[in-house]
Every structure is written in C-alpha cells, then in structure tokens.
Image (tube, rainbow, N blue to C red):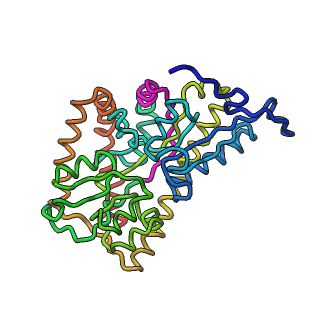
C-alpha cells in the first residue's frame, strides 16, 4: 500500500492554537467508524468510551469522531476502510472481517472455545497478540484488544427446540464459525448486521436469532417477538472487540500517543467486561419478570453441536495456514486451561449454585 500521511494538516491534523500546554502544534482528528450502533450497550459504548478516554488521556492531542454502523462505512467493512487508508482507525470485532482471513474468528470467539478471561490471557501472555499482529500486519492493520462480551445467549427461537429435528430448515441469524457449526445440523445460518435483526425476526424472515446476551438482546427488543431464549451460546462463549489502526497512521504517532491508544483500549476492555456482567444480571431478571423463559438446549443437541464443531474446526485448520497457526497456539494454552478451570472455577460454581 502506498504510504499515506495521516498527521499532516488537512489529512487528520488541524493546525489550531490551543491553550493547553501539552499540545504544541495541533490536534490529530480522526474519524472512527464502528461495526456497531454507537448507543448499543457494551459493544457500541465500547467505541464511544474509547474515544472519550483517548481525548482525555492525550490532553486533547487526539480527537476521535465515532460513527456508528453504516453511518460512514458498512458494518462489516470497517477493517477494509482502515486497511485502504480511507480512515486511520476503526472499531469492530475481528470475525466481521473473516472473509479476509479465517484466523480472524479465533481473535473474536469460536464454538466451545475460550472464556473471556482465558481469551485475554492467551492474547496477553500466550502469544496470541504477536500472532494477531503478524496476520493483521499483512493487511496494513495494527489490532488492539478492547473488550469482550463474555458468554452469550444461544439464541431466541420462535418454537421450542426439543431435539435435532426441530433445527431442520430454521432460518437463524448467527455469526462466525457458529454459523458453520449450525449449518451442519440443518440450520440455514444467516449473517446480518445487528440493526436488521429485529425486523427480520418480526417479519418471519428469521425463525431464530443469536445476538449477544440479555443486556443487548433486551435493548434490541428481541423479547417482543418471542419469549423463548436458549442458553448458553455454545457457539460463542466469548466475543472479543477490537480497535484497528492503519499501520502507516500508527507509525506516524509518537510513542506516548501509541501507548495512550493501547491504555485507553485496555481500560475500555475492563469496563466493558464488567458492564456486561453487571447489566446482563439486571436484564435477565427483567426479562424473566416479563415472561421470558431461559431454556437449556437438549443434551442431544449439545452433543451434536460439539461433533459438528469438531468437523468445522478441522476443516478450518486444513484450509487456512493462518487458522492452523492460531489453533496450535490456542490449543497449547487450553490443554492446560481446561483442567485448571475444571478443578477451580467449575467446582466453585457447582458448589455456589
């Protein structure tokens, strides 16, 4: 890619006279499109909070104008816009760009995969970030982790799921490799932006929809269509969020401003994970009071999901060298994480419950 100047006047840097002594020459002004609506709890507010923190932490030297899904670029085209240099920075989730590299799925979340805390542990200390940097660097992108939704809802269904036969032919909105897993069970998996889910479910274009969890599902009104919510999302036990910066733009930032972007994203990550944990609790209680049933998938369905996922995972490993590299790294960590979580967290949760 031809190198672009992002910090020059007229290309993101406005020459202004400011009273703040920390700003010597001007302000870096970048547009930041997001793959989510700005006001969407957790996923959308992750981007607006990031922009707020960056401006405060930089003493006004970087100002980010956040655009929600579709306002500046299509929801699934944020990484493309950053890669091409049309914008310097964007906010999304990696698997929205999985058509560019299958490995992107594992930087978000995959069926029967890592929990949110395990995902962060792998990124930070298990070599995940280095692999992410390498794979995204080939596309002129600098990826920065900015949070996680935690375990999600398995889906809102118009009819009860009592066995595998009830999945046959269902039109279901579901993202990522979870969609590939469900296709093997006879589901017609559909990927669509969040803003289209309610209307499609209401119109009958969808028979079921997996979005996020009680907080966001309630905010999008899915309980107004059906009162049957199946949990948990074996297809998506966690879902990472990201900030992506064009590598040319990143290189033009001073080291302290680079550190500010990373620190702001990390604070957002902690806040977002806590926000989901706290407000999902409130939303679930409200939904139950309104008549929503939170149901478990039948054992035969869970077992079939696991078998289908094993097939999808190995297909991905065989088809993509990048996916195989990520998988090798993740499996090296999860082989040890699984017995640890079983001995500590699972025993504790069983006793507490």
Q: Is residue 327 magenta?
A: no
> Can you say whether 300 is above or below 52 in the image?
below
* Horizontal side of residue 42 vs 14, given as left or right: left
Which residue reaches farthest right? 19
**Who's the residue at 64% across and 28% down the image?**
6
Locate residue 325, reporting x and y percent: 31, 28
In the image, 94 versus 110, the foreground residue is 94
Locate residue 157, reporting x and y percent: 28, 67
Locate residue 213, reporting x and y percent: 40, 61
Question: Where is the C terminus found, in terms of image quarters?
Answer: bottom left
**Count of marks overlaid on the render:** 0
Locate residue 174, reporting x and y percent: 32, 54
**Who's the residue at 59% across and 46% down the image?**
267
Quarter of the image for residue 288 reads: bottom left
* Horizontal side of residue 135 vs 57, given as left or right: left
Quarter of the image for residue 258 reads: top right
> Can you say whether 136 is above or below 232 in the image?
above
**Who's the residue at 52% across and 43% down the image?**
91
In the image, 172 versus 279, the foreground residue is 172
Which residue reaches farthest top? 2
Quarter of the image for residue 23 reads: top right
Which residue reaches farthest left? 165
Q: Is residue 139 magenta?
A: yes
> Can you say whether 246 is above or below 191 in the image?
above
**Who's the residue at 28% across and 38% down the image?**
335
Residue bounds of the magenta highlight: 130-149
In the image, 126 versus 32, the foreground residue is 32
């Amino acid at each position: 890619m031809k190198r672009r100047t992002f910090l020059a006047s007229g290309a993101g840097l406005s020459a202004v006279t400011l009273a703040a002594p920390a700003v010597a020459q001007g302000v870096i002004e970048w547009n930041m499109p997001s793959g989510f609506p700005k006001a969407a709890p957790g996923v959308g507010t992750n981007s607006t909070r990031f922009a707020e923190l960056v401006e405060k932490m930089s003493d006004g030297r970087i100002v980010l104008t956040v655009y929600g899904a579709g306002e500046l670029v299509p929801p699934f085209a944020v990484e493309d816009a950053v890669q091409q240099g049309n914008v310097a920075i964007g906010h999304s989730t990696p698997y929205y760009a999985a058509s560019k590299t299958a490995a992107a799925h594992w930087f978000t979340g995959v069926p029967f995969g890592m929990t949110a805390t395990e995902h962060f542990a792998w990124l930070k200390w298990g070599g995940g970030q280095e692999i992410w940097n390498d794979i995204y660097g080939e596309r002129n992108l600098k990826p920065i982790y900015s949070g996680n939704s935690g375990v999600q809802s398995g889906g809102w269904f118009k009819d009860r799921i009592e066995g595998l036969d009830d999945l046959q032919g269902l039109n279901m909105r579901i993202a990522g490799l979870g969609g590939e897993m469900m296709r093997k069970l006879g589901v017609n998996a559909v990927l669509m932006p969040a803003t289209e889910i309610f209307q499609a479910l209401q119109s009958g274009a969808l028979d079921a929809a997996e979005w996020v969890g009680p907080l966001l599902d309630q905010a999008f009104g899915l309980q107004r269509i059906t009162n049957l919510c199946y949990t948990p999302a074996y297809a998506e036990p966690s879902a990472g969020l990201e900030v992506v910066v064009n590598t040319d733009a990143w290189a033009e930032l001073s080291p302290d401003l680079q550190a500010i972007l990373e620190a702001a994203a990390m604070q957002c990550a902690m806040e977002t994970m806590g926000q989901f944990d706290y407000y999902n609790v409130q939303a679930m209680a409200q939904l139950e009071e309104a008549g929503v049933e939170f149901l478990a998938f039948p054992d035969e369905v869970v077992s079939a999901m696991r078998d289908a996922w094993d097939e999808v995972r190995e297909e991905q490993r065989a088809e993509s060298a990048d996916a195989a590299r990520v998988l090798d790294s993740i499996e090296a960590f999860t082989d040890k994480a699984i017995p640890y979580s079983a001995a500590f967290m699972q025993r504790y949760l069983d006793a507490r419950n």
